[in-house]
């Protein structure tokens, strides 16, 4: 069976993997599983043949990663990972401006833009917009004002990865905040939301966070032999008043979602093993559809 990646990956509990390495190693994650669950062809085109561009929103994803870092790992780690573009910084220079700059024919204002960005890019940290930095720090104040949330964060370990290999495929998850209770785990997962907290119960199912919780619980137990007995989401509003709310997934919801995870993984493994993937709509045999309409024209119930 063809593996999802080209190289051997570390399995077990992963403490020291950078977020970019985690997302880029080709393993099956809960996000990829949800893509297959929604549209198997999209999974195949995005993650197998790579013919489809990634639908990952870099701007939204960067904000989410930055807030996770700040709220779970603290200001020191945040400053190690991110550099904040000053408010009012010049726009990046165009290739033509750079060409004129190196030929000594650039305009003063253009040359200043080139100088600024060349110096700025020498710093290898991830660029973060000024407004995103401000938003992260505003949302953090809301989290710090939530007693239970801060207690859970303080009692856990941030950004702990888990990876296993089954039937030639790597499966992985990364717990935002892992709380070790000795013979079991509890997990806190941070979600920023552009909607109202009144709709968080809908978000659990709309975005299949229940499937995420089940997938994480499954992988973590496979790796550690310890069950996840409590999975809680911390929702934080990106818009004022930036309220936050804790929502714990019930046992019944988790149990049902686990059935979905198991069935979906079986289908994914079957596709990798056989090399047969769902066809795109353009390859559907329309002769069958035409036959249906012909029968209906003849008054036959179909």
Image (spheres, rainbow, N blue to C red):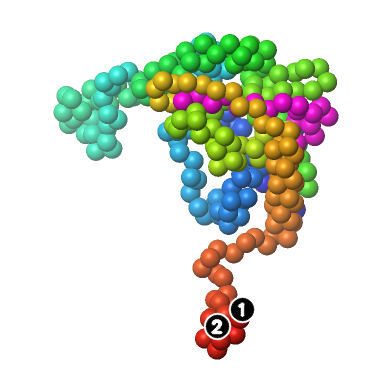
Image quarter of residue 229 = top right
Instruction: Judge by depth and name the residue closer to the eye, 53 or 229.
Output: 229
Which residue is painted at 56% across and 86% down in the image? 299
Return the mark for residue 296: 2
- Mark 1 lies on residue: 302
Tell me residue 24's x, y (percent): 58, 37
Q: Are marks 1 and 2 in contact (CB under 8 Å)?
A: yes
Which residue is painted at 75% across and 28% down in the image? 228
Return the mark for residue 23: none
Relative to 221, is 52 above or below? below
Which residue is painted at 61% across and 27% down in the image? 247
Image quadrant where one finds the C terminus: bottom right
Tell me residue 82's x, y (percent): 46, 20
Crowdedness near tag 2: few (<14), some (14–19) or many (≥20) residues, C-alpha within 10 Å: few
Q: Would residue 69 be visible to someone looking at this image? A: yes
Image quarter of residue 235 = top right
Q: CA distance from mark 1 to mark 2?
A: 7 Å
Q: Would residue 14 be visible to someone looking at this image? A: no
* Residue numbers of the magenta segment: 218-237
Instruction: Judge by depth and name the residue closer to the eye, 40 or 96.
Output: 40
Crowdedness near tag 1: few (<14), some (14–19) or many (≥20) residues, C-alpha within 10 Å: few
Which residue is painted at 45% across and 38% down in the image? 57
Image quarter of residue 289 = bottom right
Tell me residue 243's x, y (percent): 47, 21
At mark 2, the secondary structure is helix
């Amino acid at each position: 069976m063809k593996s999802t990646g080209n190289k051997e990956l570390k399995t077990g509990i992963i403490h020291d993997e950078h977020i970019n390495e985690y997302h880029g190693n080709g393993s099956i994650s809960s996000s990829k599983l949800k893509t297959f669950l929604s549209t198997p062809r999209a999974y195949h085109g995005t993650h197998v043949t790579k013919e489809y561009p990634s639908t990952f929103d870099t701007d939204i994803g960067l904000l989410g990663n930055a807030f996770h870092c700040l709220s779970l790992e603290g200001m020191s780690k945040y400053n190690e990972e991110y550099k904040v573009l000053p408010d009012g910084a010049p726009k990046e220079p165009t290739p033509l401006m750079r060409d004129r700059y190196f030929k000594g024919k650039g305009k003063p204002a253009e040359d200043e833009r080139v100088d600024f960005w060349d110096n700025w890019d020498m710093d290898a940290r991830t660029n973060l917009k000024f407004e995103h930095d401000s938003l992260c720090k505003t949302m953090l104040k809301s989290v710090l004002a939530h007693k239970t949330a801060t207690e859970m964060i303080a009692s856990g370990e941030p950004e702990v990865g888990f990876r296993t290999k089954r039937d030639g495929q790597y499966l992985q998850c990364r717990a935002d905040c892992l709380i070790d209770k000795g013979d079991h785990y509890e997990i806190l997962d941070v979600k920023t939301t552009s909607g109202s907290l009144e709709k968080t119960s809908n978000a659990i199912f709309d975005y299949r966070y229940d499937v995420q919780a089940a997938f994480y619980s499954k992988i973590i137990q496979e790796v550690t032999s310890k069950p996840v007995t409590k999975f809680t989401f911390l929702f934080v509003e990106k818009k004022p008043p930036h309220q936050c709310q804790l929502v714990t997934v019930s046992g019944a919801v988790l149990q049902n979602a686990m059935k979905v995870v198991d069935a979906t993984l079986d289908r994914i493994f079957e596709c990798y093993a056989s090399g047969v993937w769902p066809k795109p709509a353009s390859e559907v045999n329309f002769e069958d559809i035409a036959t249906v309409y012909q029968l209906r024209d003849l008054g036959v119930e179909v």
